[in-house]
Image: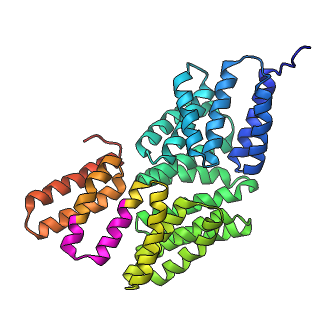
Amino acid sequence: MSIEVISAEEISNLLNSWYLQMRDRNLEKAHQMKVEIDEKMMKMEENQNVLLYYSLLELRHNLLMKQAENAETVFSSIEREKAETDHVLEYYYHYFKGIYCYERKHYEEAIKSYMIAEQKLTFIPDPIETAEFHYKIASVYSHHLNVITSIQHVLKALEIYQTDENYRVRVADCKNLLGSNNILLKDYERAEVYLQEALKESQAVNCRETETISWQNLGWMYSERDMSNEAIHCLEECLPWMIEHKQLYYQMKTMYLIAKENFKLNELSKALEWTEKAEGISNRISDQEYVSKLHLLRAKYTLGHDQYMSELEGEIPILKKCRFFGTLEGFAEELANYYEKEDNLEKALTYYKLVITAKNRLNLKED
């Protein structure tokens, strides 16, 4: 009895449909399609390009489903077996590698991969794919504190998304990112306009995830403006969805900000309670950046100033080793200012140099 052989073209068409479901964040449908495709892959005629395409989409699926270990396994396999291929697959390889590096907080590597993918973007005729790319690269530039470049990319994405009513959620996502970038620029009035628009847009289409991010960004903005009560209100609005959907990273980040604002309000017991909750998550998910930030937040408000500076100095090598240059820049500047006031100019100069190093690395310049 002969075994049915499925053509590579049929599988390729299924893979295209699967990717569209992932791109549009239809998680349940994407999972169902993966099950269907996995069964058919066993019967596909041999075709190395289609096998690579499947592996790349499997990587994207694992990242989308927050399956970090599976993503690492698939990525390692792709790195071992990848060979020369066509422009489209080269685009997806570098684009998904950028997403993979971004999820692992390897922002420099992510940007480098995205920049290679951008050279291949002309081979992808779909305007929504172009918008997705610009949104993704804008996100990593924002995290890398290269704000102006991030804004340039997110405006390109927004222009495309606004032409299609089916992408109102992505319009809200873009406005959230524009709001975040304007917080980093300390243009709080403009940030608030974007974030309120993102909040209304996400509520209009009943997207709880994007609404949650809007509330969190508003909380962060009010925190930066030292409007602690307003910040806490917004941050507490976004926690229920995060807890319900087990979004541990976002829970930790939100709890950190709530703790910080309670410290500012001298609500010590509340602040310590939120700090402990956030520390529990940071240890659970092994997020070294927030392990350090939470340790230093506690030290800043419970120890004397000199002792806090000593604790801060102890965390610097860890942040440097992990290449958290955005966090490193701010803490190094604190130490530089401290030692300058102490007339310890040698140490002050050391930390001012570290500030410059961090700024250069954020702008992808070598020392």
Q: Looking at this rendering, what residue extends furthest in the right direction? A: 1
Look at the picture and state if 194 lies above or below 356. below
Residue extent of the magenta highlight: 292-310
Question: Looking at this rendering, what residue extends furthest in the top direction?
Answer: 1
Q: Write down the quadrant of residue 12 in the picture.
A: top right
Picture quarter with the N terminus:
top right
- The picture places residue 188, in percent across and down from the top left corner, at 45, 72
Count of numbered circles on the image:
0
Q: Is residue 282 in view? A: yes
Q: Nearer the viewer, residue 257 or 294?
A: 294
As for residue 203 lying within the magenta part, the answer is no
Position of residue 217 in the picture relative to residue 164 (left or right): left
278 sits to left or right of 237:
left
Q: Nearer the viewer, residue 325 or 299?
A: 299
Q: Is residue 307 magenta?
A: yes
Q: Is residue 334 visible?
A: no
User: Residue 339 sits in which quadrant?
Assistant: bottom left
Residue 249, position as x, y percentages in the image: 52, 59
Residue at screen point 56% across, 76% down? 236
Dominant SS of magenta comes to helix
Quadrant including the C terminus: top left
Coloring applied to the structure: rainbow
Image coordinates of residue 342 in percent, x first then y, are 10, 69
Task: State the residue at coordinates (49%, 42%).
Answer: 101
Asked if 122 appears above or below 281 in the picture, the reply is above
Residue nearer the viewer, 136 or 71 = 71
Residue 225: name its quadrant.
bottom left
Left/right of residue 26 with respect to residue 366 in the rendered view: right
- Which residue is found at the position 61% from the left and 54% from the top? 158
Residue 103 falls left or right of residue 26 = left
Q: Nearer the viewer, residue 300 or 328?
A: 300
